[in-house]
């Protein structure tokens, strides 16, 4: 199947090394309680060389090892809720808050807390927001005088979007 260039012995040593590595990896997974055998309910059944811990379906055969289940769910949508304030943080490649509610006459200040530069630029043409590239800790401010919704983005990272909702 393979051309013989006098490396038959080498191929055998490589194959033997691969087999030993595979066996070691399978042994490690087995020792960690991981088995390719599972029931329809998802409980792990003992594989070769493993024992089932009495009264504990799917329990690990390794003493002192346990799996915990989180007791609370993560918060979702908190950053998307409209916030009334006059400041927007630029951090972790996002504007926070993503929706800011202000009254007409409010000056909003954006502060770049990332190590990368970002801009604050109106999403539509002709919008009022046009910051330069803001270095770390740099700020940009704009006074909103007219009611409306002002969508904006970072032109360097267009996936970064947010809006300011201005009311009377």
Image (cartoon, rainbow, N blue to C red):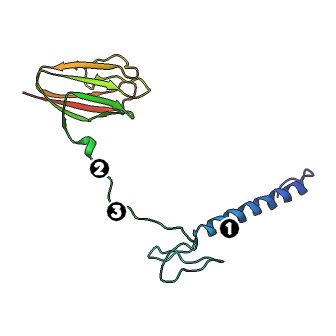
Q: Secondary structure at mark 1?
A: helix
Residue 144 in picture, x, y percent from top left: 16, 21
Residue depicted at 46% across the width and 73% down the height: 42
The residue shown at (23%, 31%) is: 163
Direction from residue 166 to residue 51 in the image, left or right: right
Q: Marks 2/3: CA distance?
A: 16 Å
- Residue that extends furthest to the front in the rendered view of this protein: 64
Q: Secondary structure at mark 2?
A: loop
Give the mark nearer the N terminus: 2 vs 3.
Answer: 3
Instruction: Please tell me whether mark 3 or mark 1 is closer to you in this view.
Output: 3
Q: Residue at coordinates 43% horizontally, 26% vertically from top-left?
A: 116
Q: For this view, does 59 lie left or right of residue 107?
A: right
Q: Residue furthest left?
A: 168
Q: Earlier in the sequence, mark 1 or mark 2?
A: 1
Return the mark for residue 76.
2
SS category of the residue bearing label 3: loop
**First in sequence: mark 3 vs mark 1:** 1
In this image, 139 relative to 143: left or right? right
Q: Which residue is mark 3?
A: 71
Q: Residue furthest right?
A: 6
Residue 128 in sight in this render: no
Which residue corresponds to the image point at 22% horizontal and 35% vertical from the top-left? 99
| Of the pair 12 and 60, the residue shown nearer to us | 60
Whole-number angstrom distance, CA of label 1 to CA of label 2: 40 Å
Q: Left of 6 or right of it: where is 62?
A: left
| Quadrant in which the N terminus is drawn | bottom right
> x, y percentage for residue 40?
46, 76
- For mark 1, what is the residue? 27
- On the image, the x and y values in percent for residue 149 come to 17, 29
């Amino acid at each position: 199947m393979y051309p013989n260039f006098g490396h038959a012995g080498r191929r055998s040593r490589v194959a033997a090394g691969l087999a030993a590595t595979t066996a070691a990896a399978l042994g490690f997974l087995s020792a960690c309680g991981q088995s390719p055998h599972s029931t329809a309910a998802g409980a792990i059944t003992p594989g070769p060389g493993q024992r089932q811990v009495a009264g504990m379906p799917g329990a690990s055969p390794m003493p002192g090892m346990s799996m915990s289940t989180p007791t609370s769910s993560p918060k979702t949508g908190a950053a998307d809720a409209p916030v009334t304030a006059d400041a927007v943080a630029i951090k972790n490649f996002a504007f926070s808050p993503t929706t800011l509610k202000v009254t007409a006459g409010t000056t909003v200040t954006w502060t770049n807390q990332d190590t990368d530069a970002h801009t604050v630029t109106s999403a539509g043409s002709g919008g009022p927001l046009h910051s330069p590239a803001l270095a770390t800790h740099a700020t940009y401010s704009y006074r909103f005088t007219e009611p409306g919704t002002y969508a904006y983005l970072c032109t360097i990272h267009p996936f970064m979007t947010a809006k300011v909702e201005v009311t009377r």
